[in-house]
Image (cartoon, coloured by chain):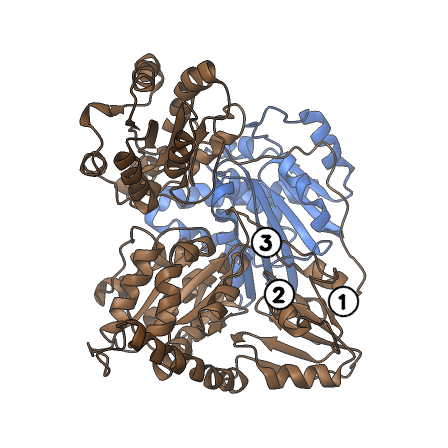
Chain colours: A blue, B brown
Amino acid sequence: MKCDIILAGVGGQGILSIATVLGYAAVESGLYLKQAEVHGMSQRGGDVQSHFRISDKPIYSDLVQKGKADLIISVEPMESLRYLPYLNKDGWLVTNTVPVVNIDNYPDLEAVMAEIKKLPRHIAIDGDKIARDVNNLKGMNMVLAGAASVFIDLDFNLMKKGIECIFAKKGEEIIKANIAALTAGREFSEKNR
Amino acid sequence: MTKKKMLLMGDEAIAQGAMDAGASGFYAYPGTPSTEIMEYVQHSKMAAQRNIHRTWSANEKTAVEGALGMSYAGKRTMSMMKHVGLNVAMDPFVNSGITGANGGCIVTVADDPSMHSSQDEQDSRILSKFAFIPILEPSNQQEAYDMCFYGYELSEKYMTPVMMRVTTRLAHSRSGVEVREALPQKEIKLPEDKRQFVLLPSIARRRYKGVLETQKKLLEESENAGWNRYIDGKDKSLGIIACGLGFNYLMENFDGECPYPVVKLSQYPAPKKMIKKLVEECKEILVLEDGMPMVEEDLRGLLDRDVKVKGRITGELPRDGELNPNLVALALGLKDVEGQPVPKIVAPRPPKMCTGCGHIDMYNAINATVKAKYGDGHVFSDIGCYTLGAFPPFEAINSCVDMGASITMAKGAADAGLFPAIAVIGDSTFCHSGMTGLLDAVIDKSNIIVFIGDNSTTGMTGGQDSHALGRLTSIVKGLGVDPDHIRIVNPVRKNHDEFVKIINEELEYNGVSVIIPTRECMQTLRRKTKDAKK
């Protein structure tokens, strides 16, 4: 088993919460893991990415090789396209459709969506709306994690357990809300893949 | 016994490793990608229980000196910094190569090839070699952890500081690390030679000869300690020297089974015997280094004879920027596997100042006065979030060189007759290296205005405590700035006119003015509010 993932978004969107949930499930499954993060300057509203690798064999590189990623998970549509050179020819792109427009020259959203739709394997999901639908205004990241989970060979129950651990301090309500977001995301992908 | 495994970033593995190896004190100034080492220690229960020193230092020089003092007292210690921080600390660093260490002393330097968050991509291995200080360069998180134990032993055995050199990708990448049972801290034990640390010329000359002599033993350590390995391969048409992370990218390309002989290089001085064997057995040599071509240059030598060496100098790898698996694949002559190109419509998204940041109000006021009246070219800035004032819509600053250079460059430009000459610096950077420059300006009665953007934190690196907190104005007064020309303003939109008035008044004054826009960093405030809720 091997899964190389690029997590993408804009500094401040919190892509690392997705990595934490996936990471928990991977470690509990006894898999090897390497996860390279971006810290520092780019966190100030710039483009950020994380290379997330899991495997049942030892992993050497902290970085995913271009052309070898099995999956891109992006919490922002334009950012999902920035990492296409990483995606392998059979890879899936799972992206949120809600843009973060913090630059003057943000492209036409329809053109962005057209580029995404050109890909033979993609899931474009309005993570913000689905999060609202399950009454979890901050749950977009978990919706995306759920939507991507369909393409990762990890036990879904372990991902739920990951949420329980990560949000343990915040109480039962928050845990439930995030599991609901995760599950709603997964259901969307199952229907639309 | 099942071994305990932790999921740690490279930085965290170093922090945990040093604590487990019995470190009594950590000394550092924040700087990407090294910051998380100290942050990990500060959040560690073990550090609190063991009363390990873990407060920030004013700058990297005071950090390395503090650590050297702890080593003098016989305890194990670590100083941490980013590569450009080592420049600030070069004085104690180089001379600690001559004094040597007493208690184990590791200087951890995190380099940033590709300049993700830096103004250059210098390679600290070269500076450590210059200082005769041995280097450990882990290739993964586990080695980073384990090397702390070995590093302290090496340091104490040969009475020398040891450099731990990592680069961004290891510093900020997580992986499973098997941890060991923690060693106790050392007791206070003064150096046996009471003159060891007294670098008077007569003593320094004697010590220097000793340091040169020790190099032979350090070379033997490199050959035998096990961190450097000769890994045989069937195909002798190529031999590969893979330094630090370079080894990972090599193995990634061959799924762990490289057909060529490899020297995995993680300890310096570079192991001569191993490399000699590789050169003798193989037709060509490829050197993979995450940084500058140090080993490649050494191997090539001045005359470029005998050995056919490939790498960054010959163009198989790019001369600048960090390594990655794709670049290494190309250097190995493998097929490029890159996916499809980035669509043209994707726009760059550079970092920017946060909505509501006080620096924005500061630049609006500076642009409404200095830029409006005198045009571009008058503002010297510094290292911090406010450096983002170089980008639109502000385009307000004309320099960013090194920590503290805003004040001294403004002074030098004023000396040359430039008017107005403006410096923009943050509160933490001011305490790091701005204070001495301001003293120069006070002594010379330079005609400059210094803005100290006081956001009560070290913002760019994630909100560490600033030494200026609660004492900025008294420091400025103490350095001799006329209190009538120390002006404090709350940088919010409704105070724009007042801010502009203050700047105009100070432009009229021929001397050193210090204007301190004071408002807490939005991010730090948000984090504090969040923590308070917990």
Residue occupying image coordinates x 61% and y 76%: B264
- Badge 3 amino acid: His
B316 vs A104: above or below: below
Kindly tell me whether residue B112 is visible in this rendering: yes
Residue B179 percent location from the top left of the image: 40, 73
Rendered image quadrant of residue B355: top left
Q: Nearer the viewer, mark 1 or mark 3?
A: 1
Nearer to the camera, B450 or B461: B450
Residue occupying image coordinates x 29% and y 34%: B444
Please tell me if label 3 and label 2 are on a single chain.
no
Output the chain of dot 2. Answer: B
Nearer to the camera, A52 or B464: B464
Query: Where's the C terminus of chain B, which quadrant?
Result: top left
- Calculate the distance from the C-alpha at mark 3 to the C-alpha at mark 2: 21 Å
Nearer to the camera, B326 or B517: B517
Left or right: B516, with A87 as reference point: left
Output the chain of dot 1. Answer: B
Task: Report the residue marked by disc 3.
Answer: A51
- Badge 2 amino acid: Glu
Residue occupying image coordinates x 20% and y 35%: B480
- Calculate the distance from the C-alpha at mark 1 to the C-alpha at mark 3: 23 Å
Please tell me if label 1 and label 3 are on a single chain.
no
Rendered image quadrant of residue B295: bottom right
Q: Disc 1 on helix, strand or loop? A: loop
Task: Report the residue marked by disc 1.
Answer: B332
Please tell me if label 2 and label 1 are on a single chain.
yes
- Badge 1 amino acid: Leu
Left or right: B148, with B283 as reference point: left
Output the chain of dot 3. Answer: A
Pointers 2 and 1 in contact (C-beta within 8 Å): no
Residue occupying image coordinates x 35% and y 55%: B60
Task: Report the residue marked by disc 2.
Answer: B289
